Image (spheres, rainbow, N blue to C red):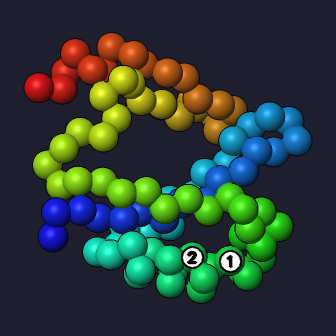
Amino acid sequence: MKYVYFLQHGYELPNGQDVVKEIGVYSTYKKAKEARERFKDLPEFKKYKDGFHIGKWKFGEHEWEEGFFAHIEGGVGYTFHPLFKDYIK
């Protein structure tokens, strides 16, 4: 297996805050799609059915080299750390 497929769900609250839920990682795109179908009608997800995203990651590769987001205490927001790329070799 060279790749994995991750399923996440996200949307923006009226106050502008992003909500993102990491749902799972799957061995095939088909399995990720099947999981999306199972989750889409649950109360936490059905209001924002278009909020699902399936991504593809390659094993042994860095996927986010330009920085990362860190959770700020209390769940108020996020901040960007662009210097992270200096640590990826």
Return the residue at label 1. Answer: 40
Would you say 82 lies left or right of 65 here?
right
Q: In the depicted view, which residue is nearer to us: 17 or 34? A: 34
Residue at horizontal 57 percent and vertical 76 percent from the top: 36
Above or below, 79 relative to 1: above
Q: Residues within 10 Å of mark 1 (few under 14, many from 20)?
A: some
Mark 1 near mark 2, Cβ–Cβ under 8 Å?
yes
Would you say 26 lies left or right of 60 here?
right
Would you say 59 lies left or right of 29 here?
left
Q: Secondary structure at mark 1?
A: loop
Return the residue at label 2. Answer: 36
Residue 41: x and y, percent? Answer: 73, 82
Q: In the depicted view, which residue is nearer to us: 19 or 49? A: 49
Q: Quadrant of the C terminus?
A: top left
Above or below, 87 relative to 33: above
Residue 4 quadrant: bottom left
Above or below, 9 relative to 29: above
Question: Residues under labels 1 and 2: Cα distance?
Answer: 6 Å
Residue at horizontal 33 percent and vertical 75 percent from the top: 28
Residue 33: x and y, percent? Answer: 50, 77
